[in-house]
Image (cartoon, helix red, strand yellow):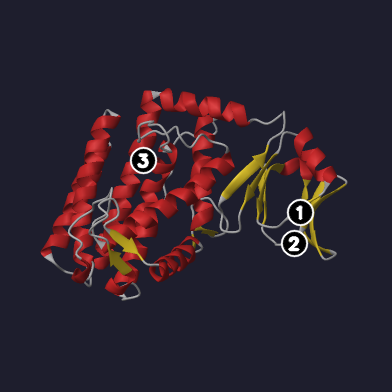
């Protein structure tokens, strides 16, 4: 069974016999056996006919509507949908302490690995002792991950690894923007403003993938369920924070694409002491979109996929784990 992605703007999905056909201006763009489609994902302005709607609803095939940039709009769910079953099994998976711990360990291990790899890449140009110490701290934390027996202790190890990482991250940045370490609520220097903005964008992108799959974004393994906090989204973000957001911040700051001129101090507004200007926001959004459209190699995939597509694939792993179709979560690791 496969997911049918419709991305050609102005195209129309039709049903012809036992096949689903994508057409535009009289030309057939794609034709697939209808029986092999388990979900349809529509990006932007794509049309589909009434016979297609009837077929999808009759056969319990969900249709997900996303913007061109991947923002989740909603879904068409039939009475025969397996959406409810998936969510029930997702909850049971989270309640299974041993399996939940294993998934959380994989996520934290991947985050620490990707953070360490990012620092190691920078070591060639930044041979400071502080950077080497940070790498050693991440290696120590990574070794501790599999020895944890509770989520609470795993969170402690992750916190120690993150602290080491940001000490190394500081060494890779040009120093004139005042970054001394990670802070938030509110961020108090330009670099932390960029990190927080980037992590917010990443959360939206991953939540779209989670909702596309049909999982409950508020039920996670590592992050505790707190009102209005999308715990599963925050879980799946971890392995991508250094790969997507931190690498963008490093490039924009060190290349002087973003400078002091793109930030405004608000000393009388304690909840937002530093603001990113409209021009700064445009530059960051352009860099973010370029990054998530980057194609990467994924084990088990015949073709490279964009990072945005990879967010969804990672969520689909959680669905397969919940449904008993997969035994171990495979995080995405950079080399």
Please tell me in which quadrant of the rendered image residue 225 appears: top left
Please tell me in which quadrant of the rendered image residue 258 appears: bottom left
Q: Are marks 1 and 3 in contact (CB under 8 Å)?
A: no
Write down the residue under mark 2.
10
Q: Secondary structure at mark 3?
A: helix
Neighbour class for label 2 at 10 Å: few (<14), some, many (≥20)? few
User: Is residue 148 visible to us here?
Assistant: no
Q: Toward the viewer: 17 or 85? A: 85
Compared with 14, 256 (above or below) is below
Q: Position of residue 98 (x, y in %)?
A: 36, 26
Q: Position of residue 297 (x, y in %)?
A: 49, 59
Q: Position of residue 210 (x, y in %)?
A: 52, 42
- Please tell me which residue is depicted at 53% across the width and 47% down the height of the picture: 208
Write down the residue under mark 1.
47
Write down the residue under mark 3.
106
Q: Residue furthest right?
A: 17
Q: Position of residue 277 (x, y in %)?
A: 37, 67
Check the picture and name the quadrant holding the N terminus.
top right
Numbered circles on residues, count:
3
Compared with 136, 144 (above or below) is above
Relative to 324, 94 lies left or right: left
Q: Are marks 2 and 1 in contact (CB under 8 Å)?
A: yes
Neighbour class for label 3 at 10 Å: few (<14), some, many (≥20)? some
Neighbour class for label 1 at 10 Å: few (<14), some, many (≥20)? some
How far apart are labels 2 and 1 at the CA level?
Answer: 7 Å
Compared with 220, 142 (above or below) is below
Relative to 194, 141 lies left or right: left
Mark 2 and mark 3 lie on one chain; the one further toward the N terminus is 2
């Amino acid at each position: 069974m496969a997911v049918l992605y419709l991305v050609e703007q102005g195209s129309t999905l039709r049903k012809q016999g036992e096949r689903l056909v994508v057409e535009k201006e009289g030309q057939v763009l794609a034709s697939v056996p209808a029986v092999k489609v388990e979900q349809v994902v529509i990006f932007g302005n794509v049309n589909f006919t009434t016979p297609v709607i009837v077929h999808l609803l009759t056969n319990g095939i969900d249709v997900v509507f996303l913007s061109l940039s991947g923002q989740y709009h909603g879904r068409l769910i039939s009475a025969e949908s397996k959406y409810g079953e998936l969510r029930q099994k997702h909850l049971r998976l989270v309640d299974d302490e041993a399996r939940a711990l294993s998934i959380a360990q994989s996520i934290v291990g991947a985050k620490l690995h990707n953070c360490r790899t990012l620092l190691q890449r920078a070591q060639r140009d930044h041979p400071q002792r502080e950077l080497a110490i940070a790498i050693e701290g991440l290696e120590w934390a990574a070794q501790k991950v599999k020895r944890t027996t509770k989520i609470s202790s795993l969170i402690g190890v992750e916190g120690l690894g993150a602290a080491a990482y940001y000490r190394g991250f500081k060494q890779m940045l040009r120093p004139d923007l005042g970054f001394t370490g990670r802070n938030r609520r509110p961020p108090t220097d330009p670099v932390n403003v960029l990190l927080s903005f980037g992590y917010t964008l990443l959360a939206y992108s991953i939540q779209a993938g989670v909702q596309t799959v049909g999982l409950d974004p508020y039920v996670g393994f590592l992050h505790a369920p707190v009102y209005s906090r999308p715990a599963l989204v925050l879980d799946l973000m971890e392995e991508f924070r250094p790969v997507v957001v931190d690498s963008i911040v490093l490039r924009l700051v060190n290349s002087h694409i973003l400078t002091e001129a793109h930030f405004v101090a608000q000393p009388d507004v304690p909840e937002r002491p530093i603001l990113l200007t409209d021009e700064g926001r445009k530059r960051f959004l352009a860099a973010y979109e370029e990054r998530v459209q980057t194609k990467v190699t994924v084990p088990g995939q015949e073709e490279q996929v964009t990072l945005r597509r990879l967010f969804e694939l990672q969520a689909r792993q959680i669905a397969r784990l919940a449904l008993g179709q997969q035994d171990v979560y495979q995080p995405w690791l950079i080399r």
